[in-house]
Image (tube, rainbow, N blue to C red):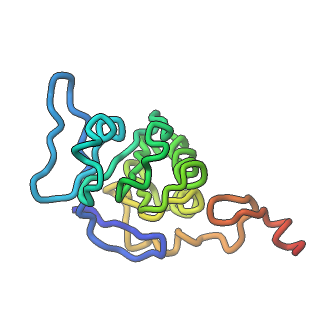
């Protein structure tokens, strides 16, 4: 089971299972005894079955549009965003859209090719938990979550850029 990093740098076990998209003609296979993250569009197709279940969350791939869950984001306990490659920044935009435009208030998790030096930037976009790539040391995560003492840009966590914060 991978370790989960919280936004304050704490480590805990990740009990959630990311259910891969089934091949064409196959059914979605949920684990029996663990909470599951299903592809967002499949959650929407099965909304009547999955709605209000605390053990079923959703995950977005980097090419998915978060608009598909507009108005329903707070019906799921956990939303994960897959970063398929560390150079793919679309997940940052998905995180900000979920928080700022769609008002998601639950746990927003970064999964996939997540590296230590990305953590503070993901946190600034609204991510609250992180699962590092398997070859990375999660015990070092706390120092990377607040690596920079000041940030220049406005983001989900700070609505004013540094020059405006200094002027006030």
Residue extending furthest left? Answer: 32
Residue at 44% x, 42% y is 69
Q: How many marks?
A: 0
In the picture, measured across the screen, residue 168 lies left or right of residue 108, that is right
In the picture, measured across the screen, residue 93 lies left or right of residue 37, that is right
Residue extending furthest top? Answer: 25
In the picture, measured across the screen, residue 126 lies left or right of residue 152, that is left
Q: Is residue 105 above or below residue 59?
A: below
Residue extending furthest front? Answer: 48
Image location of residue 29, percent across then percent down: 14, 41
In the picture, measured across the screen, residue 56 lies left or right of residue 121, that is left
Residue at 53% x, 69% y is 145
Image location of residue 71, percent across then percent down: 48, 46
Q: Quadrant of the C terminus?
A: bottom right
Image location of residue 108, percent across then percent down: 44, 58
Give whichever of 147, 128 is nearer the camera: 128
Q: Is residue 141 above or below residue 105?
A: below
Image location of residue 160, percent across then percent down: 77, 64
Residue extending furthest right? Answer: 167
Residue at 38% x, 73% y is 139
Q: Quadrant of the N terminus?
A: bottom left
Residue at 21% x, 58% y is 35
- Quadrant in the rendering for residue 76: bottom left
């Amino acid at each position: 089971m991978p370790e989960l990093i919280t936004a304050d740098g704490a480590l805990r076990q990740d009990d959630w299972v990311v259910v891969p998209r089934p091949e064409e003609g196959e059914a979605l296979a949920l684990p029996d005894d663990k909470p599951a993250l299903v592809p967002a569009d499949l959650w929407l197709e099965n909304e009547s079955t999955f709605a209000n279940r605390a053990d079923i969350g959703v995950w977005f791939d980097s090419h998915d549009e978060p608009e598909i869950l507009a108005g329903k984001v707070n019906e799921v306990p956990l939303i994960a965003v897959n970063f398929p490659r560390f150079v793919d920044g679309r997940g940052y935009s998905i995180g900000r859209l979920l928080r700022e435009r769609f008002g998601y208030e639950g746990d927003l998790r970064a999964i996939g090719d997540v590296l230590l030096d990305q953590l503070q930037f993901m946190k600034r976009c609204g991510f609250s938990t992180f699962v590092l790539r398997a070859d990375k040391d999660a015990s070092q995560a706390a120092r990377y979550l607040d690596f920079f003492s000041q940030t220049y840009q406005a983001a989900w966590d700070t609505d004013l850029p540094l020059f405006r914060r200094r002027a006030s």
